[in-house]
Image (cartoon, grey):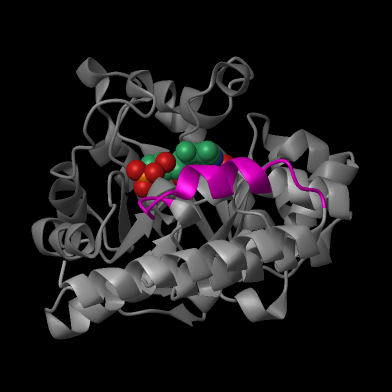
Amino acid sequence: MKIGHVEVDKGILLAPMEDVTNLPFRLICHRYGADIVYTEFVSSDGLVRDARRSIEKIKLAEEERPVAIQIFGGEEDIMVGAALRAEESNPDFIDINFGCWVKNVVVRNAGAALLKDPEKMASLTASIVKAVKKPVTVKTRLGWAKDSIVIVEVAQMIEDAGAAALTVHCRTRDMGHDGDADWSWIPKIKKVVNIPVIVNGDIKTPEDVKRAFDETGADAVMIGRAAIGHPFLFKRARQYMNTGIIPPPIHHRERIEVCLEHLQLEIDNKPLKRAVHEFRKHYGGYLKGLPNNSLARQDVVRMEEFADISHRLLDFSVELDTIEHNSILLGT
Ligand SMILES: Cc1cc2nc3c(=O)[nH]c(=O)nc-3n(C[C@H](O)[C@H](O)[C@H](O)COP(=O)(O)O)c2cc1C
């Protein structure tokens, strides 16, 4: 797949996720194998007003490349202004969010609301493509509701508008994040467009990644929730694609080391207190399934200093070493 100068074969991409895919998380996912990472969606209104939080979200690092900035909005002049502002951060490409289902976005005629007006979606795309030099891609859903699936027409329209790729979250807006993603639309889209098509929704394991490629013929896959607390998924999926052998689970020591590496990145990028608090949502994922993890988790979510968290998690790791050692001795 080629998007501007970015070329990846069977890419495994990190999905944009609000309050999740900040710079530290993108860096960790990049280090553990994500082929392209995306910022969380950034409000076009915020960007054109130079709002501090919006500007913070488009701060990129060389190490994370290739990286896309995702914007959302509903008004042409504001979105064009926001795309130009995003371009100043020098992303590899700009992605437009036409898939966000949440009420306070769709009432502003942004995100998935555009699925009710594909012509406007196409004209917004065309205006942004015309205004910026970077490639512009689109991420959307199948349609507004199950009885109004428009993705095949939308794909053609946004290709004609000059989009460089299309990501499809294979659910309708009314599904939110519930129900199963329906990948069967991807081959139908692939039949009518030449731009790369990226499949998204319910890709949780290395086997899912391979199945998504095999069943849909998509040019790349995009992973969202399953990467939270488990950035190793990208490299495990790549190993599985290359060898056909399911890689062993990630050892507890590596999980804890990467958790601390991620926390340190968070602290490097924002004030300590905020970093430590915002990081709390990640412990569940990093410690998931480890024996006796609840006590360690309860402790670290109350801690405010890196050194305390690090000691507690390293102690937990030693505790797990002992459990592992005993179970080897017992042959269990
Ligand atoms: C916490 C959270 C935040 C999200 N924020 C965004 C966003 O900012 N932009 C976007 O296009 N999609 C967003 N999404 C949707 C994901 O990108 C993705 O399409 C969806 O989670 C389905 O993929 P998954 O099954 O791999 O999680 C978000 C999803 C979650 C769970």
x and y percent of residue 246 in the render?
17, 73
Image quarter of residue 249: bottom left
Q: Quadrant of the N terminus?
A: bottom left
Q: Is residue 88 visible?
A: no
Number of numbered discs: 0
Residue 173 visible in this rendered orientation of the protein:
yes
Answer left or right for 17 relative to 148: right
Q: Position of residue 327 (x, y in %)?
A: 25, 69
Of 312 and 305, the residue lying toward us? 312
Residue 31, horizontal then vertical, whole percent: 53, 77
Residue 329 lies left or right of residue 164; in this view the side is left
Vertical relation: 330 (above or below) 100: below
Span colored in magenta: 288-304
Q: Is residue 104 left or right of residue 285?
A: right
> Which residue is painted at 61% across and 48% down in the image?
40
Magenta span includes 67: no
Q: Quadrant of residue 268?
A: bottom right
Q: Is residue 222 above or below residue 77?
A: below
Q: Position of residue 322 (x, y in %)?
A: 41, 70
Q: Which is more toward the observer, 238 or 160? A: 238
Q: Report the quarter where the C terminus lies.
A: bottom left
**Residue shown at 47%/73% (left/top)?**
253
Which residue sits at x=79%, y=65%? 307
Is residue 294 inside the magenta stretch? yes
